[in-house]
Image: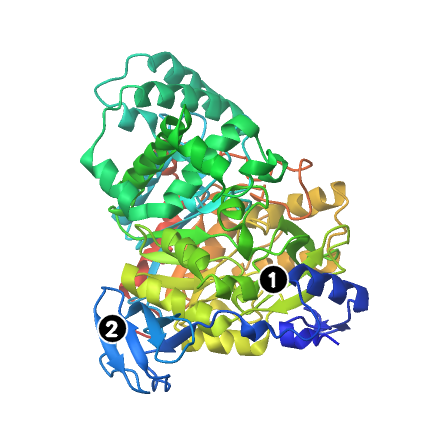
């Protein structure tokens, strides 16, 4: 008899409304099958990993030799050394037991420091007049420089995760091919081709012409940028910095680039490739990587990532870049191919029904199997977190509750027919703290939705900031905690203009999304009461009032969306839709050049700047 809880599978759960839900034995059985659970097998019999906090008393260990991350060795006789350095070490027991990873973590993430504020931007939407139809990393650099001049200390952006290098470009930044690498759509081509623009002038003109349409045509952008980048790469003769980058990113970059080169030939998902190419360690993949056109195409994708890294570093140098790490990846994408042995087949990640998503949510993402991830020494998780912190002073961890448990939905079942699976949060949080410490970055955990009480307590103890939203908090911003990021809204929720005009609720009705009518009306009433607005109050004044309130929050960090700064009515993403709403595809109605002088944006910035200079109670 298999004990589901021994495998971390929950037979039931309390939903966001407090009601107890049981998925049934069939659903639990399907989840266990996906894990490969068998009667008489203990999941703890796999490869052990010991993650310790250096700010806690160190646990006893078996006698043996500890190989430190830098290659030095230390003899341990039942007790770890008091001066154990941070890092990823290896313990070789004297017994016949196999060596196992020992992760030494600071336990806590870096403090966010003095109160700060910043813009929350959907980078793809934040175009300049020089953009090729989509916001890029040069636009981010300009946005960060402007923000810094206004007194902002951060710029929060959507995930920049890589999509497949194919004709059809995935619009959602939260449905990534790889979270370890970035999307070449965000490259500013002219910065790569500087001094050698022959052949791209016509492509650049066609790209800039796309700015005339508010709806972003990623497929057209990709076609133009690909043509230009291929031409520049053809003239690339090598660079020592490129070689260093490839060495630094190592096997993770090689695996991603190899998948990208194969995807150009065989498309996606990789599960439909010829059988001999479906594993990265196969002889056929090795042959592709070492002969014919394979090496050149692999080098091309490494080269793209090198330039993305350089342009991201330049943007980050303007100060306070805050990256966003999505909760999962596309089952048919690069990470799921490279790290395929750590994922659970036949399962998708989502969220159970709640008051704002009454049908539940199916995000279409495969979950990591917690036991297989541990057996891999957590390397895929380490690479993912490390990439999210690259050139950043802060990290937004999407759906941070996923470090504790994730809602698994078996294929061919509805979003309401899933259950939760537990994860080794102690190990994962220790890794997150270690990587954040090395990056010198604070961490914000997006903890909106169904959250267990102990989760927020554990995150707070780890110095991971919580989320507080004007739409959801019962009290005014003055009552919010310091250890949080405060905001009015997020990309999945209505803008202030959308709430005030009623257009957001109208859109949900039109799309037949079973909206929470009462909750939406209460949201508008709360906005009116909090800002002292009446039906005739102009939307710009309501937005101004909302951010005047937000400025009173004692939170370590507060953010204002560029959508609100331009009084945009449409939210960036409408959960529960695919093609019925232009998800992740609406540019801001004004380019950065006009945003920089927009009166409402400057009013918001002035409200929030004052809190950083003289925080409430200071």
| Residue in the foreground of this view, choosing between 263 and 360 | 263
Q: Residue at 35% across / 25% down in the picture?
A: 130
The quarter in which the C terminus is drawn is bottom left
Circle 1 crowding by C-alpha within 10 Å: few under 14, some 14–19, many from 20:
some
Percent position of residue 274, x then y:
60, 33
| Residue in the foreground of this view, choosing between 561 and 1 | 1
**Label 1's element?**
helix
Count of marks overlaid on the render: 2
Percent position of residue 47, x then y:
48, 69
Percent position of residue 244, x then y:
23, 42
Q: Is residue 152 left or right of residue 338?
A: left
Instruction: First in sequence, mark 2 or 1: give its number.
Output: 2
- When the figure is inspected, residue 214 is found, relative to residue 152, above or below; the finding is above
Report the disc number at residue 526: 1
Outermost left residue: 240
Residue, disc 2: 85
Percent position of residue 30, x then y:
74, 61
Q: In this rendering, does residue 245 appear at all?
A: yes
Q: In this rendering, does residue 555 appear at all?
A: no
Hey, which quadrant is residue 102 in on the image? Answer: bottom left
- When the figure is inspected, residue 457 is found, relative to residue 139, above or below; the finding is below
- When the figure is inspected, residue 140 is found, relative to residue 107, above or below; the finding is above
């Amino acid at each position: 008899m298999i004990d589901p809880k021994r495998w971390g599978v929950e037979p039931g759960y309390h939903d966001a409304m407090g009601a107890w839900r049981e998925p049934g034995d069939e659903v639990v059985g399907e989840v266990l099958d996906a894990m490969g659970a068998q009667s008489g097998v203990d999941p703890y019999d796999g490869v052990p990993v010991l993650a310790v906090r250096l700010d806690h008393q160190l646990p006893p260990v078996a006698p043996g030799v500890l190989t430190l991350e830098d290659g030095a060795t230390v003899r341990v006789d039942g007790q770890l050394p008091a001066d154990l350095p941070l890092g990823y070490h290896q313990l070789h027991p004297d017994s016949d037991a196999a060596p196992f990873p020992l992760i030494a973590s600071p336990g806590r993430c870096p403090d966010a420091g003095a109160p700060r504020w910043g813009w929350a931007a959907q980078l793809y939407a934040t175009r300049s007049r020089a953009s090729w139809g989509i916001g890029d990393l040069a636009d981010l650099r300009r946005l960060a420089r402007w923000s810094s001049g206004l007194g902002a200390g951060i710029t929060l952006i959507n995930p920049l995760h890589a999509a497949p290098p194919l004709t059809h470009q995935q619009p959602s930044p939260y449905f990534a091919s790889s979270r370890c690498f970035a999307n070449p759509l965000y490259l500013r081509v002219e910065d790569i081709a500087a001094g050698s623009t022959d052949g791209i002038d016509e492509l650049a003109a066609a790209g800039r012409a796309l700015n005339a349409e508010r709806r972003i045509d990623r497929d057209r952008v990709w076609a133009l940028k690909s043509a230009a980048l291929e031409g520049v790469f053809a003239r690339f003769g090598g660079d020592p910095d490129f070689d260093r980058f490839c060495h630094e990113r190592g096997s993770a970059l090689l695996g991603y680039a190899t998948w990208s080169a194969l995807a150009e030939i065989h498309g996606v998902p990789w599960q439909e490739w010829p059988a001999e190419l479906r594993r990265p360690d196969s002889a056929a993949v090795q042959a592709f990587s070492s002969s014919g056109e394979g090496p050149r195409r692999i080098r091309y994708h490494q080269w793209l990532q090198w330039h993305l890294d350089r342009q991201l570093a330049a943007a980050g140098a303007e100060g306070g870049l805050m990256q966003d790490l999505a909760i999962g990846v596309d089952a048919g994408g690069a990470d799921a191919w490279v790290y395929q042995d750590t994922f659970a087949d036949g399962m998708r990640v989502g969220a159970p029904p709640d008051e704002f998503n009454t049908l539940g949510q199916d995000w279409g993402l495969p979950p990591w199997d917690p036991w297989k991830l541990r057996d891999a020494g957590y390397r895929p998780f380490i690479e993912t977190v490390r990439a999210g912190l690259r050139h950043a002073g802060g990290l937004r961890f999407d759906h941070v509750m996923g470090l504790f448990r994730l809602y698994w939905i078996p294929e061919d079942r509805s979003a309401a027919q899933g259950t939760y699976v537990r994860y080794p949060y102690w190990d994962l949080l220790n890794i997150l703290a270690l990587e954040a410490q090395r990056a010198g970055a604070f961490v914000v955990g997006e903890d909106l939705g169904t959250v267990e009480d102990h989760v927020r307590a554990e995150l707070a103890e780890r110095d991971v900031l919580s989320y507080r939203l004007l739409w959801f908090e019962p009290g005014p911003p003055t009552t919010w905690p310091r250890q949080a990021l405060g905001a009015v809204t997020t990309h999945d929720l209505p803008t202030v203009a959308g709430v005030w005009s009623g257009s957001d609720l109208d859109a949900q009705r039109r799309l037949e999304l079973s909206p929470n009518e009462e909750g939406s009306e209460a949201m508008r009433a709360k906005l009116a009461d909090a800002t002292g607005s009446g039906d005739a109050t102009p939307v710009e004044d309501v937005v101004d009032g909302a951010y005047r309130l937000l400025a009173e929050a004692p939170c370590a960090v507060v953010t204002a969306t560029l959508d609100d700064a331009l009084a945009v009515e449409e939210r960036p993403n409408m959960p529960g839709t695919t093609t019925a709403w232009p998800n992740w595809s609406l540019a801001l109605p004004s380019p950065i050049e006009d945003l920089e002088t927009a009166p409402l944006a400057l009013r918001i910035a002035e409200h929030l700047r004052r809190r950083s200079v003289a925080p409430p109670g200071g």
